[in-house]
Amino acid sequence: MSQSGEGAERKSREVTPEHKAAMIQGRTETRVVRQYLEALDGVRKSGGRRRSKETLQKRLAAVEQELESADSVGRLHLIQERIDLQRAVEAAEQNVDINELESAFVDVAASYSERKGISYQAWREVGVPPKVLHSAGVR
């Protein structure tokens, strides 16, 4: 299924330094945005105030003990709580600095929004606070 010599006559495309720089900028901005949104999502899912790793581990031990005498439905709920607590402990161990991620996000959000056509409302719906958008120059 070759087309009349098109492939043979095609010039190889060279990527200009400007295009390479734009690709690097795009990948960098996307990484920064992804990390910030994932951190926001983690904060939102944890709900309420932050609990220390020690507090989480104490509750995890208590759940294990309660499982020994729980009825069927209680056991189901305790198992889910154990899963949630284990995830929270893992997240606490990662020590994500939301302030650092937010600062990096502020630096790239306006450019990313313009390049990708992302509106203020879309950012708000995924949970980015208005003050962060304002700092980033996204209106």
Image: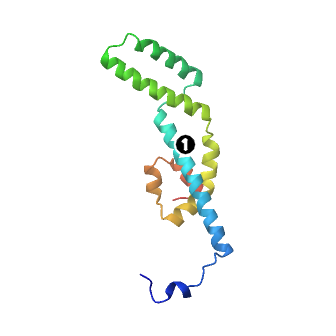
Q: Residue furthest front?
A: 1
Seen at 61% across and 66% down, the residue is 23
Q: Residue at x 52, y 43 (%)?
A: 40
Residue at left offset 52%, top offset 47%: 37
Residue 66 pos. (x, y %): 42, 13
Question: Residue 108 at x, y = what percent?
Answer: 60, 58
Nearer-the-camera pick, 11 or 81:
11
Q: Position of residue 76 (x, y in %)?
A: 35, 22
Residue at label 1?
39
Residue nearer the viewer, 117 or 12 = 12
> Vertically, is 102 above or below 51?
below
Q: Is residue 71 above or below residue 45?
A: above
Give the structural element (helix, strand or loop) at label 1.
helix
Looking at the rendering, which quadrant does residue 58 occupy?
Answer: top right
Type of amino acid under label 1: Ala
Q: Residue furthest right?
A: 17
Question: Whole-percent x and y of residue 120?
Answer: 47, 57
